[in-house]
Amino acid sequence: MKNLFSKKDIQKFILNYKKIGISKDLAERIYTSRLLGSNKKLVLHGGGNTSVKSNIKDIDGLNYNIIYVKGSGSDLGNIEPSGFPAVKIDPLLKIMKKKFITDEEMVSFVRKNLIDITSPNPSVETLVHAIIKEKFVDHTHSNAILEITDRPDGLKLCKNLFGLNFIIIPYVMPGYLLAKKVAELYKSGKNLHGLILFRHGIFTFGNTAQLSYDRMINAVNIAEKYLKLEEVKKLIKVKSKNIKFKNSEIANILKKEICRKRNYIINFRTNKSIISLINSKNIKKYLNKGVVTPDHVIRTKPRPIILNIDKCRTLKDINNKIHKEISLYKFEYVKYFNKYNNSKKSFKILDSIPQIIIIQNMGIFSVGRNFNEAIINGDISEMSIKTILRIEERSKFKSIQDKDIFDVEYWSLEQAKLNKVEKSLASKVILITGGAGTIGIATAKKFKENGAEVILIDKNKSALKTLVKKSHFKYYVCDVTNRKQFNKVAADICTNYGGIDIVVSNAGSAFQSAIGDISDDNLKNSFNINFFSHQIVASECVKIMKNQGLPSCLLFNVSKQAVNPGKNFGSYGTSKAALLALCKQYALEYGHYGIRSNGVNADRIKSGLLTSEMIKKRAKSRNVTKEDYIKSNLLNKEVFPSDVAEAFYHLAISEKTTAAIFTVDGGNIEASLR
Ligand code: ZN
C-alpha cells in the first residue's frame, strides 16, 4: 500500500482551512482522514473513524481540552470540519472510571459534553480515541489486517507480525465495553504504534498526523507482505454458464419476495471479476461463516443468500426457487433472532429479508432502503466476499461468533432508527415521462420530497441535463413513442432499482388547427405522442408490475380537453379523449393484479406545451385577455404545475382509488366529470 502523505499537500490544507478559521490541528486531521478514507482497502462508505486532541475557547471564555472525533453520517474520504464534532475530553476520561454504563448512557454523556450541541453524534468509538494519549488516532477496517485476524490461528499470526509494536485486543463489542478493554490494556510508550482489534480492525496513533498515518500504512504493508509470500490454493469453481434470463426479470422476482412488508431498492451488479468470485464452488459454506468485521452486519446482514439457477428452465422455476430460498432465509433469520434476543431488552426484529443475494454465473443483487444504500451495501458485500475468499485461499475464514454479530446488529442505538416514521413513498421507484417539462419536474420534486426514488425520462437531452445539474435527478434520454427504446430503459431501471412501482405518463404535445383542416400527418403525430406513447409506456410497465406482484400504479396526464374540447384544439383533444379511455381500460383489466390506473385532468398551466404564444392564441380563440384566459375558472385562480404534482401525489398514495380522474383546473363546470 502506497504512502500518499505529502508535506506540500498538508501545508495547503492548513493554509486553506486557516482562511475560514479552522485550526491547524483540525486541518491536519482532515488531510490524513481523507487519505485513509479514499483508500477502499482501508475503509468503505463511512466506515472507520479518526480523531485529534486539541483545545478550544468556548463562549464562556474558558479554554477546554477537547477531542475532535469523526461524527456519524460523515465519510472519511470527503470529510469536512463539520464532520468532526468537538467533545470536552476530561469528562470522558472520568466516565471511564465507572464499572459499566450502557451504550445509551455513553452516547448521551458524550453528547452532553459537545462544544456545539447541534453537532452530529460523535463516533461510538469516541471513548477509545479519548483514552489513547497520543494526539492523532486513526481507525480503519483494513482488508489486509482482517485477512490476518479472521482465521483460526489469527491470534498467533498477529502476535508474530505485530506483537512488537501493537497491542492485540481480543474481540469485544464496539462501545463502552471495548473502551474498557482498551483502557485496561493500553499503556502509552514510544514503541507502541497502535492496537489490533481482533476480527474487527486496527487503530494507529502518533503525536503528529503524519506519524499516525505512516504507522497505519506500515502495519498494512506488513500484513500485505506476509499475505503475498503465503502459499495460495486455488478454490474450485462451478462450471461457467451463460444464463439466458435477463437480470431485470430476476430483479422483478426478487422485488416481489423482498418487498412484501415494505419497499426496497434492489441493485444488480456484475462483471468478470465478480463472476469469478461468486462462482467458487463452496462459496455458500465460506460466506455462511459470518462477517469480516462487525461493522458490516448492518449493511449485509449476518449472511447472504447464494443461489444457482443454472438448472432452471423457465422463469417460473426461478420464481419457485427464489421463493423457497427467501422463505428459508427468513425462517433461519427469525430463529437466529429468537436465539440471541435478550428478553430483558425486548428488541424489535429487523425485517428478516436478505440484504445480499448472490446468483452464480450472474452477479450480486444488493438491497437498500434507497438507491444509495443499495449501492453501499453492494460495495461492502463485494469487498467482504473478496476478503473471505482470499482468506480461504490461504487458510480458513473465521468470523466473530453469531452472538457477537447479533449484539452489533441489534445495538440498541441502531434500533432507535427502526422507530422512525417513514415517508409515504419511501423506497418506491417512480418513473416520470416528459420528465424535463414543467409538470414533470414539479411532480418529480413532490414525489422525491415524499421519499420516492424518482427517475426522469425525456427525449430532450439538453433540457434534462440542465435540470439534473440543478436537482440531481436520475434520468434517461428516451423517445417514449419508440417501444424498443423504452423497453431498454425499463429493463435498465429494473436492473438498477429492482422494478417500477409508479409511472407518471406525462409526455405530451399540442398542435393547433381546425379539425377539418388538420393534415393526417399532424393528427397521427398528435395521437403518437398523446396516446400511443402512453400505451407503450403503460403496456411495458404492466408487464413488469405483474412480475413484481406488488401494489403499483399508472398515472396519466390526461387533460380537460378530453371532456371539454376547445376550438382548434381537435388533434390534442381527440387524442387525449382516447387517453382517458386508455386510463380506464387499464384500471378495468389490471385491477385484479393490484395495478391501479388513474388520471389527472389539468387545464391552463403555463408550460412548454402552453407557451405564452399559445396562451395568446387560445385567449384569442375564446375572445378573452391572456390574464383572464389563465384565471378563467370558478375559483378565479391561476393553476400551477405544483397543483398538478399534488394531484398525482394524492392519486399515488390513495391505495383504494382506481379509474379515477382528478380535475386540476381551478373549477370548470363544463369539464367536470360528474
Ligand atoms: Zn470499527
Image (cartoon, rainbow, N blue to C red):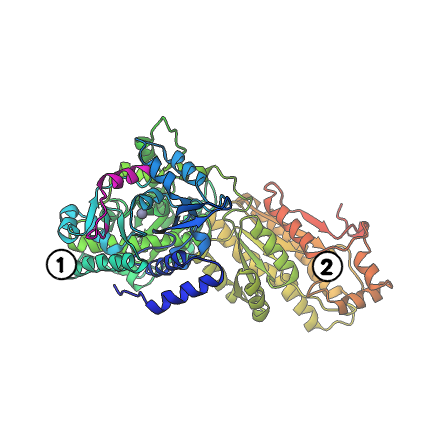
The quadrant holding residue 393 is: bottom left
Asked whether residue 602 appears in the rendered view, the answer is yes
Amino acid found under the numbered disc labelled 2? Ile
Residue that lies at the very extreme toward the right in this rendered image: 623
Q: Nearer the viewer, residue 251 or 23?
A: 23
Q: Which residues are magenta?
A: 176-194
481 vs 587: above or below: below
- Tag 2: Cα neighbours inside 10 Å, few (<14), some, or many (≥20)? many
- Residue 436 at what x, y percent from top left? 60, 64
Q: Give the side of residue 504 with respect to residue 134, left or right.
A: right
Left or right, 529 with reference to 271: right
Res. 479 mark: none
In the image, which disc is placed on residue 230? 1
> Which x, y percent locates residue 14?
41, 63
Q: Quadrant location of residue 79?
A: bottom left
Residue 311 on the magenta span:
no
Q: Mark 2 or mark 1: which comes first in sequence?
A: 1
Residue at image x 33%, y 55%?
Answer: 43
Q: Is residue 189 magenta?
A: yes
Task: Give percent across and percent down for residue 332.
Answer: 31, 37
Describe residue 400's horizontal placement relative to residue 629 as left or right: left
Instruction: From the viewer's side, name the closer residue of 156 and 448.
Output: 156
- Element type at mark 1: loop
**Number of marks in picture:** 2
Q: Quadrant of residue 509?
A: bottom right
- Work out how far the residue at label 2 is from the one at label 1, CA to CA, in angstroms: 70 Å
Residue under pointer 2: 605
Rendered view: 567 above or below 147 = below
Comparing marks 2 and 1, which lies closer to the viewer?
A: 1
Task: Check disc 1 and give the amino acid type.
Answer: Glu
